[in-house]
Image (spheres, rainbow, N blue to C red):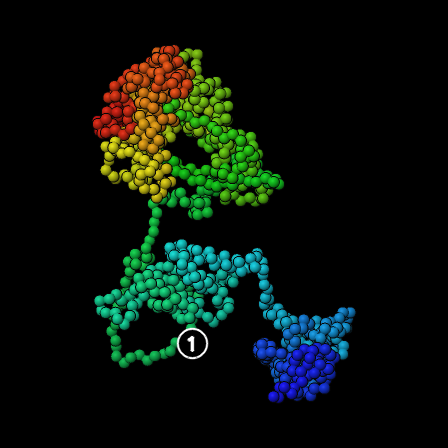
Amino acid sequence: MGDSRRPICHHCGVVGHLKARCFKLHPELRQTVHKNRPPNFSSTRTAALAETTGNSAALSDFSRLQAQIGQLQDQLGSLAARAHDTPIAPTATIATVTPTACHVTSEAPTWVLDSGANDHMTGESSLFSSPLIPITQSVCLADNSTSHISHKGDVFLSSDILLSSVLHVPNFAFNLLSVSRLAKSLNCAKGILQQLSCPYTPEQNGVAERKNRHIMSIVRCLLSGMHVPKSYWHMAVLTAVYLINRTPSRVLHSMAPLQILKPDCILFSILPRVFGCTCFVQNRSPHRTKLDNKSVKCIFLGYSAMSKAYRCYDPVSDLSPSIEITSPLARPVPIFDSMVPESSSPPVQRSSPPLQVYTRRPRTSVSPARLIFGPRFSTNHPISQYISYFGLSDSYRAFIGKLESVSIPRLIRHGELVPLPAGEKTVGCKWVFTVKYMADSSVDRYKARLVAKGFTQVPGKDFGATFAPVAKLTSVRLLVSLAASHSWPLHQLDIKNAFLHGDLLETIYMDTPPGFRAEGEYAGKVCRLRKSLYGLKQSPRAWFSRFSEVILSMEFVRCHSDHTCFIHPRLDGCCIILLVYVDDIILIGDDAPGISQVKQDLGKVFDVKDLGSLRYFLGIEVARSRNGISLSQRKYTLDLLQDTGMLGCRPASTPMDPNLKLSTESGDLLLNPSMYQRLVGRLIYLTNTRPDLTFVTSPGLGLFYSASHQSGLSCFTDADYAGSQTDRRSTTGLSTFYGNHLISWKSKKQAVVSRSSAEAEYRAMAQGTCEILWLRSILNELGFTEKDSSQLFCDNKSAIMLASDSVLHERSKHIEVDIHFIREKIRSGIIVPSFVPSSDQTADVLTKPVGPSLLQSSIVKLGLIDIFAPA
């Protein structure tokens, strides 16, 4: 009822005044009320402020503001009380606390705390302690009115607090104290400044992001080092922060961050442990019996922040790691005595007991390693494949320094160190360390090579053509056969750093090698390569072009059938044959002085290493006796068996089960396809001396070229009709002999489906004809012209008749025209087709799996022997 009799303002809707006395409509009445108010009219002023709030929410906000103002006033009062005796300019001394003003003594002015004001303002010029600076500006007050600012200066609020840039507004009724400016000034004086960054802009907060990177790098090490699941990442973060705060830092003068923050704090109240290690926690269960274990095997996951305890995890009971378990028995990490401060209190002197007490001598027990360190992991990969330059020891770094003294001057001589032109990119490089072995698995030498990162080159800009020919292994076997039949010497040469001799046609810039200190005149420069380098895409082509240029200048002639073979004919009928495979060279011939002269001439241009007689070439072991020359890959086979874990397995009688039919739709998927692909590639290289692939039966089996030679080329061809279960294509098999020496062989699936077995055999005969023609061509260039016809053996009479007769048969009219060239060679007398029984067919083992008896007979026919078998 009382509320209904109170006046209501029809302008703002607030109860307690009329429209004529409304402050919003008549703001000039507000200053009149303040001037007429008694000095101790605090309760009335509080009530007036309550009326202006309008609702309960505003009252609650005002109460929180009142509490904040009270805290600030307490702080200001304490600062003023400590320096009340200091004679300074007139200051305000805090006496009482009101919601909006700081009431002071009778001599000190009153300051009103205003949370909405941007600057300090006063109307009394006597409060300023510094010379006033004139200003010609205006300030907007809370009632939207403007007042002129005459000056600004500094005012001492207390002996320790100085208000800077206080605005002097003449005839202003109050001394306004800006809360925001005061708080900002105090924070700046203490070195604290709050700045907010924009969302998703980590570059604006580089210090925090760098610390986050530091913490996360330690977290990753903790998780991966002990194989802790990623689900416990939060425990790793807490542990990382715990260790960082207690680790001495060089920036802090070998002090830990916690020592700087709390000098009296003990860094390690409990001993630190290895994160993720195995620990044994005392079993304190009330239900534990005498036969139960006294401890529980757990995993250490950090430290407790609330007590002197560890945080451990029990995998059996799935105990949460947040539960704190004390007394783990894991092996502690050693700490320094200086990190644990001594106690400040002196030790308490206790009286000794009156009776002598005998104690048992303490016994130290060491737990087994498997319990102390937990599960251990190892790998069967050689560590030499994972060593980088940055992980080398001092001795190896000195070794690299010795290499630099040789390689860097050569690099500078073959190039130059220049500034990188604008718009150009450099190619990286690294050191590659390898070990070269002899045929008996002994170490030949250790090799260190500077290799360019050619995978960063851009085609068309950094390199053009990259093809470089290499010697065919068929050519190698042919030369060995000629050396065995004519008793020619076999010599082997090696070109050191062959690729460094090639001339580059493109402009290539490379980074300086790792470990090379670019100081003085070389600072900030890169290498401009003049010569080729290992790793560059065009290096093989550049090296072969350079070698061909040198060898042709020595009156050698290139063999057109094999561009890696060079012939040096002599007028007296002698000849020298040179075969090059990248940087490995084979020299044979009947002119021993001429071979020595070739070695000397090559040594004048390249850095040549004379390896003497041919013994080990591209993983092929060469052994010579008066009976002939043998080729084997025994070391390569044993390494292959050891790498695949098959060295101790039971040998098989055949390399493949005759009853096994492979299909792409049957069987399980391989867990590691790359390992299978690598194994297939190594087996393919093994067929260079092993056409039968019976390495599990006898690793020492290899080709043998006897000294008793019979001239003439012959080829055996065979086909397995529709042998593939997937596409029903046939498999071609052929073996070519030079006299009684097996020179080449092939096992390949045909490109098209044959409609009959005769067609499949006919296509195999065409492949054999191509092989004979190529071998006749290279023998003719080497000076061994084949005057007689070459024999082409086949065990299918229909195919022989199809090749001999030029009549168009109904079953052969669909065969491609290029296949029929075999008829032309037969008419010219180069090829003579002959029938051979299947029992004498040497190519049968190359088309399909065979049984043990047929395999053993094929081994004898192919000329394979075990040179390590007892005589």
Of 790 and 16, nearer the camera is: 16
Image quadrant containing the C terminus: top left
According to the image, label 1 marks what residue? 345
Residue 814 position in % (x across, y down): 39, 20
Answer left or right for 148 relative to 559.
right
Q: Is residue 666 above or below residue 755?
A: below
Answer left or right for 718 relative to 126.
left
Q: Quadrant of residue 135?
A: bottom right
Answer left or right for 582 relative to 175.
left
Total tally of numbered discs in the picture: 1
Q: Is residue 647 above or below residue 804?
A: below
Residue 645 position in % (x across, y down): 29, 41
Image quadrant containing the N terminus: bottom right
Residue at (25, 79) in percent of width and height: 355
Residue at (40, 43) in percent of width and height: 385
Residue at (53, 60) in percent of width and height: 208
Residue 123 position in % (x across, y down): 74, 78
- Label 1: few (<14), some (14–19) or many (≥20) C-alpha neighbours in 10 Å: few
Viewer can see residue 489: no
Of 155 and 436, nearer the camera is: 155
Of 569 and 689, nearer the camera is: 689
Q: Quadrant of residue 719?
A: top left
Considering the numbered disc 1 on the image, is that residue within a helix, a strand or a loop? loop
Q: Quadrant of residue 142?
A: bottom right
Residue 481 position in % (x across, y down): 34, 21
Residue type highlighted by circle 1: Ser
Viewer can see residue 696: yes
Of 598 and 126, nearer the camera is: 126
